[in-house]
Image (tube, grey):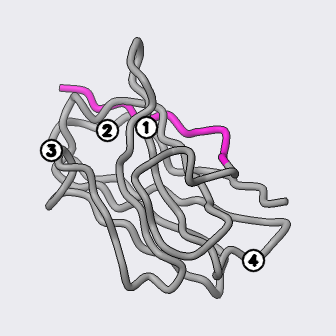
Amino acid sequence: QVQLVESGGTLVQVGGSLRLSCAASGRTVSRYGMGWFRQAPGKERAFVAAISCGGGMTLYADSVKGRFTISRDNAKNTVYLQMNSLKSEDTAVYYCAAASQCGSSAGPSWYPYWGQGTQVTVSS
């Protein structure tokens, strides 16, 4: 089993930056792809970014491409999401997810392990 704990969510102004962290425990995730998803009020959970086990392959939703960067530190069993140029539409609960194999995917069904989420609110 893998336990995931997100942190770093907070209130930030439009145009600001934020870095989310996802700490994994219970199992090393260095062999697993990892992803970030988000869910805004009244909307379905949506893909944000994903990274392969070695970090060599990344995927991004069009809405965040060029503004967000996913990275991982396998020595720390942690995945990050650097978010720059934040917009009000980025407001959501952000969830970290771990796959059970290497590679990366935008599909939530790829990921059997999920964290509890961290709230990001972008205010103007």
In the rendering, at what x and y percent does residue 53 appear?
54, 79
Mark 2 lies on residue:
12
- Gap between marks 4 and 1 measured at Cα: 24 Å
**Residue located 79% across and 66% down the image:** 25
Residue 26's image quarter? bottom right
Task: Tell me which numbered mark, 2 or 4, is placed earlier along the sequence.
Answer: 2
Camera-nearest label, 1 or 3: 1
- Gap between marks 3 and 2 measured at Cα: 8 Å
In-front residue for pair 66/15: 66
Q: Is residue 116 within the magenta segment?
A: yes
Residue segment shown in magenta: 114-124
Q: Amino acid at mark 4?
A: Thr
Camera-nearest label, 3 or 4: 4
Q: Amino acid at mark 1?
A: Arg
Vertically, is 54 above or below 27? below
Q: Quadrant of the C terminus?
A: top left
User: Viewed as shown, does residue 67 lie left or right of 4?
Assistant: left
Mark 3 lies on residue:
15
Could you say whether the residue bearing mark 1 is in a helix, strand or loop?
strand
Q: Is residue 27 within the magenta segment?
A: no
Q: Are marks 2 and 4 in contact (CB under 8 Å)?
A: no
Could you say whether the residue bearing mark 4 is in a helix, strand or loop?
loop
- Gap between marks 1 and 2 measured at Cα: 16 Å
Counting every numbered tag in the picture gives: 4
Residue 28, numbered circle: 4
User: Viewed as shown, does residue 117 lie left or right of 55?
Assistant: right
Q: Quadrant of the N terminus?
A: bottom right
Residue 38, numbered circle: 1
**Residue located 26% across and 58% down the image:** 68
